[in-house]
Image (tube, helix red, strand yellow):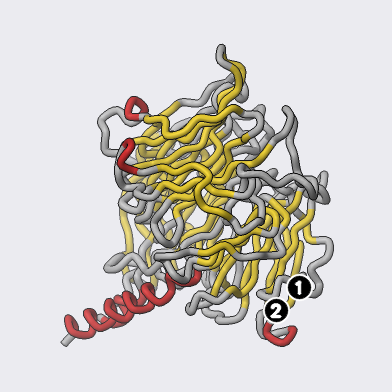
Amino acid sequence: MKQLLLLLAVLLIFKQDVSAQNRNSIWCFGDSAGIDFRNLNNPVPISTGMDGRGCSSISDSSGNLVFYSFSYVSYALTKILSANHTVMPNCTLLQGWGLYNDNLIVPKPESNHEYYNFYLGDAGAIDTTYYALMDMNLNGGLGDVVRKNVPIGAYRGADCLTAVKHGNGRDWWLIGKFSSNPTGNIDRYYVYLITPDSVCAPIVQTFGIGKDTDFQKIIWHPSYNKFININASGLMAEYDFDRCSGIITLNRIIFSQQFSNYTRLFNEGAYSANGNVFYLTYNSFGGNFGDYNYLLQFDLTASDIAASCDTLDSTRYVPTDAGAVRRGPDGKIYYAQAYIPSNALNYPYADSMYNYINQNLGVVNFPDSLGLACDFQPFSFYLGGKRTYWGLPNNPEYDLGPVVGSACDTLTNKVNEIIKIAFTVYPNPTSNEITVYSNELFNKSKLRIFNSIGELVRCVELPDQQMLTTVSLIELPPGIYSYQINSSNNLDKKDKFVIIK
């Protein structure tokens, strides 16, 4: 009977995922441009109210546009537009930055009418990540901004805001990166848990392999358990991501970064649908042959991924400039290039500036195939007389399902009437502190730490009704320690960690 109930639950989840694929059906980008993917065999251009580079959009489960937003550099502001392409009320003076992946829409968990819009701000001393909250039940169903410019961090954010569903299929993880523009080498990630009640304080993780430039991107694998991070200093590295705990783990470095700026500038990337092929846009400045843009393809199954690089397209930096690549709902890869008439940024376009470069997108028709078989066609998708800049929508996979069978998969676990509490303790090794994370709220939970001879050296009560807490270890000397976590008199986890100083 339990097996039958579990099968029905999985089928229900599958049905929801199939119907929910339409929530990414409408792309809004560029200068008044957009694409309607509701007919996957024949996507068509549409007209929008866009005029920006960083953009995000969301549709309902039938594929109808709900709203979209964009940031524009001319005024360092963010605009939120309703489905009828008019600006939402109370949308004035939202912070913004005007880059490419600095804007992101996330549905509020367990709400069918509220949405977060996260965005980076560039306002001097308050240079951080913000959110606005929209209620689509207001303004006759067109939505209104009910909160805005709410800061969630006190750090300068890089151009790589992204989000992915929590492994429970309900909550979200919002991920950002630190930028010191670009002198530092901290390589720090901020991972925020978004629950029905709040945007929680971030899990902070540092790797130290990438320069802290503004220009970075995070590109998700189709499985959403790993991503590639690229930056403007030529770094390309793949990380694993635990959707239950929010923990990031470095998997492999494909290209180490260059410390001389912008000789190898990685712009944007996209995985193929099968996850075996990676597409990368790239500027090369200052070489013997001048400045060029490239669209590159990598075989991720190769023993030497860097050596598998194949150049699909190359154009002179002027009059073209490489922009975003995105995998569309139809599985094809779309490639935006901006038009630059002289060796300077050209944004916004003059009213008379229309040509084949900014009125078309390139398309990789068969992204799972290598080399010529992928069938890249430059400037082949006509935008109906509208124009593109560098950016394409920074849309997450809105209705990704749970990690079925995992400890944090509360949907299928509830069917089996078993909910296992999963604890994660990180980092390991550590120096001065550890963070304890649980997929459920702490409930009379205690952390006990023992030294190498079994003596109890710390006993910490974890704060009730929270899921994340940090424990100081400053007073403990270097060594190997074991720990136990108990909740309501049950032993939930025991393991070891190392302190190094």
- Residue 170: x and y in percent read 46, 72
Which of the 4 image quadrants contains residue 180?
top right
Which residue is situated farthest in the top direction here?
A: 288
- Residue 426: x and y in percent read 43, 48
In the rendered structure, the answer to whether residue 146 lies left or right of residue 389 reads: right
Disc 2 on helix, strand or loop? loop
- Residue 405: x and y in percent read 27, 68
Q: How far apart are the two marked residues, 1 and 2, measured between alpha carbons?
A: 7 Å
Q: Amino acid at mark 1?
A: Met
Which residue is at 72% across, 33% downward? 341
- Quadrant of the image containing the N terminus: bottom left
- Give the labeled residue for mark 1: 88
Q: Nearer the viewer, residue 448 or 71?
A: 71
Answer above or below: position of 327 versus 18. above
Disc 1 on helix, strand or loop? loop
- Give the labeled residue for mark 2: 143
Characterize the local packing of mark 1: few (<14), some (14-19) or many (20 or more) Cα atoms within 10 angstroms: many
N-terminal of the two: label 1 or label 2? 1
